[in-house]
Image (cartoon, rainbow, N blue to C red):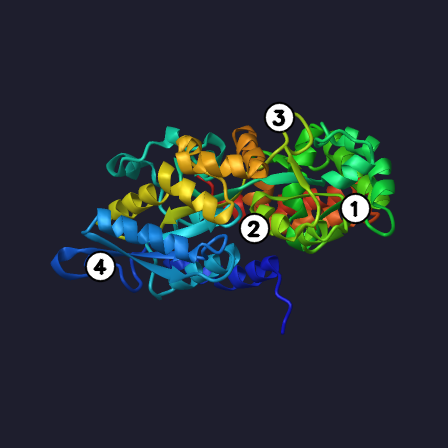
Amino acid sequence: MADFTRRGFLATGLAATAAVAAACAGSGSGGGSSDSGGSGGDITLRFLTNHPGSSKATEQELIDAFQKANPGIKVEMLDGGKNYEQVAQKFQTSLTGGTKPDVVVVSDVTWFNFALNKQIAPLDELFAGAGLKPEEYVDSLLADTKFDGKHYAVPYSRSTPLFYYNKDVWKKAGLEDRGPKDWDEFVQWAPRIQEAIGGDKKALVLADSENYIDWVFEGWNWSKGGAYSDGWDLKFTTPESIAAANQLKEVIGKWGRLVTTPENDFGAGLAAATMQSTGSLKTIASTAKFEVGTAFLPGPAGKSCPTGGAGVAITEGISAQRKAAAMKFIEFLTNAANTAKFTQATGYMPVRKAAVDEPSLKEFIEKNPNFGTAVKQLPLTRVQDNARVFVPGGGEDIGKALQQIATGGDAAAVLGALQKTIQGKIDSQIKPKLPK
């Protein structure tokens, strides 16, 4: 069987369909654009989803509850594949003349291209009609999909990185039961952690370039005063970004390793710590034979943790009636009670501020304090840098550069070349389409 990474799929699949899809976007053509989905003028919405966090059964429960509360609107769930890249591929394909969905799951790295090419609709004018109040959502999560003053998706399956550590190793190393305050403190601790875990095991494992080191390192870079970009102004070659990359190189070179599945290596006891998605909590908790600790990402609060995951968007080119019905479904899907339900089923973050006051979620957090760490960190997250999430293939380019540095490359030289690559993509693929 061919070894398809998530990134490889995105690069090949989206590139193959982008040109023709852009030509068809917003045309209103394609199967199923009519408003009638049943007798009596009922609307049948099509919801294209990859069922984030193995959530298919939960999504169907939410759909059933929505249909019961809104008898004039039916929702058909369409299988979008196993990950965000595959659902993006299927959405692109549908725009070339297939059956267009009305609602689609879009990730932090796929939505912007759809918005730029007018393939998903701006949502702000639909909010009031559906009773959706933007201020009720976690600010950084809603802001993630804002472009040119308009929101293009509503938060759905959202996550952040989290610092995981082996409490047994920490105790053996004589460390306090907490995460490091910053990466400088981790460097101070690392020799003791390495000695405590012993053998060919490592103090820290991180994701490799195919599995989003560019995401987990983003907060590390911020914590040192660096950034990938400020708006469209690239910041890879600033002294702060170079210093952060050199610290990554030191940590991986002396006490760490880049791996395909850091959550599996950490859960198997092959490393004393890792940074991985909050969505990995269940996997780690179920596999670890030791007491797992969780902490905020190292660095100043509010400056060290990026958001991640996906939202739900509405396809451009469908009728106003379908858009209104779609927004009503999205509001229901992400209301406080339902996001609390989805959170408990999947491990994704509650996207509504009031969800943390839902009795079921409060009880869940009490029983799962490590999940509580993620919820407490959530209001301190910040929106990701354009260079990673808005530039086609930007995250992949950054990941490859970071892996090159972590395994011995010269940080200044590699980041200099990276900046030229990313700038070229911005100039050729983005700037011509930006609003004047």
Closer to the N terminus: mark 4 or mark 1?
4
Observer-side mark, 4 or 3, equals 3
Observer-side mark, 4 or 1, equals 1
Location of residue 186 in the rendering, given as x and y in whole percent from the top left corner: 78, 33
User: Can you say whether 315 is above or below 303 in the image?
Assistant: below
Residue 171 image-quadrant placement: top right
Residue tagged 3? 301
Which quadrant: the N terminus?
bottom right
Observer-side mark, 2 or 3, equals 3
Q: Secondary structure at mark 3?
A: loop
Closer to the N terminus: mark 2 or mark 4?
4
Using residue 121 as the reference point, say whether residue 199 is left or right of it. Answer: right
Residue tagged 2? 392
At 51% from the left and 45% from the top, the residue drawn is: 347
User: Can you say whether 183 is above or below 25 in the image?
Assistant: above
Residue tagged 1? 406
Q: Secondary structure at mark 2?
A: loop
Q: Secondary structure at mark 4?
A: loop
Q: Decide: few, some or many residues near mark 2? Use Cα within 10 Å; few <14, some 14-19, many ≥20.
A: many
Residue tagged 4? 34
Q: Nearer the viewer, residue 111 or 282?
A: 282
Label 4, label 1: how far apart the Cα atoms are = 53 Å
